[in-house]
């Protein structure tokens, strides 16, 4: 019995299989479906694997035709083997697992603050949140603003808001 356990560990097959099947439990069903759609779009030749030609074709379909082979090779090397759908999910899972929520929110706000002031006009943010992607209602935006520091000029301190969103309400000092 001990020799069978040793063989399984040495071969790594069972362990890799177990790790890859667990990746599905890291995502909701709707997320898995979205990843599957993205995978299918990238798997241009429909062979069940994403390879260098698939990446080239995907970039070309997005209008970028001058992608260097070195860039494509670097992308493919991020995977520990051929990129089938399970590997694709594993790669996204690894990327998303290491993401700091506060840093992600800050980076999103920083895109709206090219001068790096640390604040963004609240009316501009409100318009964006109510018109883009997962649209928020005016009530939801106003509720968020209750936790935000807004100066007399109407600028929202997004660093403080990011902290509150990820750590809870700021402590009064």
Image: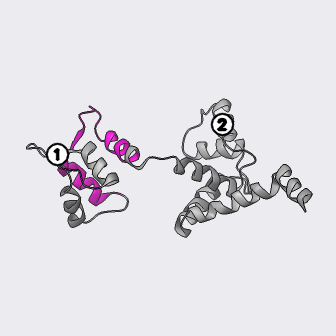
Residue depicted at 67% across the width and 30% down the height = 70
Q: Residue furthest bottom?
A: 29
> Which residue does the numbered mark 2 point to in the structure image?
72
Query: Which of the pair 33/143 is nearer the observer?
Result: 143
Badge 2 marks a residue whose secondary structure is helix
Query: Which of the pair 172/18 is nearer the observer?
Result: 172
Q: Nearer the viewer, mark 2 or mark 1?
A: 1
Question: Do the residues bearing badges 2 and 1 touch, measured as CB atoms within 8 Å?
Answer: no
How packed is label 1: few (under 14 Cα within 10 Å), some, or many (20 or more)? few
- Kindly identify which numbered label has been placed on residue 173: 1
Q: How is the image coloured?
A: one colour
Badge 1 marks a residue whose secondary structure is loop
Q: Position of residue 49 (x, y in %)?
A: 73, 53
Residue depicted at 74% across the width and 57% down the height = 48
- Relative vertical location of residue 28 with respect to residue 74 in this rendering, above or below: below
- Residue 121 forms part of the magenta stretch: yes
How packed is label 2: few (under 14 Cα within 10 Å), some, or many (20 or more)? some
- Kindly identify which numbered label has been placed on residue 55: none
- Relative vertical location of residue 154 with respect to residue 16 in this rendering, above or below: above
Looking at the figure, which quarter contains the C terminus? top left
Measure how far apart labels 2 and 1 are at the Cα level. 51 Å
Q: Left or right of 118: which side holds 71? A: right
- Relative vertical location of residue 16 with respect to residue 121 in this rendering, above or below: below
Q: Read off the magenta span.
A: 104-132
Q: Position of residue 140 (x, y in %)?
A: 24, 64
């Amino acid at each position: 019995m001990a020799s069978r356990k040793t063989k399984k560990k040495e071969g790594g097959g069972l362990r890799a299989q177990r790790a890859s099947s667990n990746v599905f439990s890291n995502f909701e069903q709707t997320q898995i479906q979205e990843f599957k759609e993205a995978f299918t779009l990238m798997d241009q030749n429909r062979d069940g694997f994403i390879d260098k030609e698939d990446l080239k074709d995907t970039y070309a379909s997005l209008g970028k035709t001058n992608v260097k082979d070195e860039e494509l090779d670097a992308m493919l090397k991020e995977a520990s083997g051929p990129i089938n759908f399970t590997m694709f999910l594993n790669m996204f899972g690894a990327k998303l697992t290491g993401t700091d929520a506060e840093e992600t929110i800050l980076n999103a706000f920083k895109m709206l603050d090219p001068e790096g002031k640390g604040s963004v006009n609240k009316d501009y943010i409100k318009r964006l949140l109510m018109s883009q992607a997962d649209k928020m209602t005016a009530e939801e935006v106003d509720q968020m603003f209750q936790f935000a520091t807004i100066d007399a000029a109407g600028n929202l301190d997004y660093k403080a808001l990011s902290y509150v969103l990820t750590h809870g309400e700021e402590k009064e000092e």
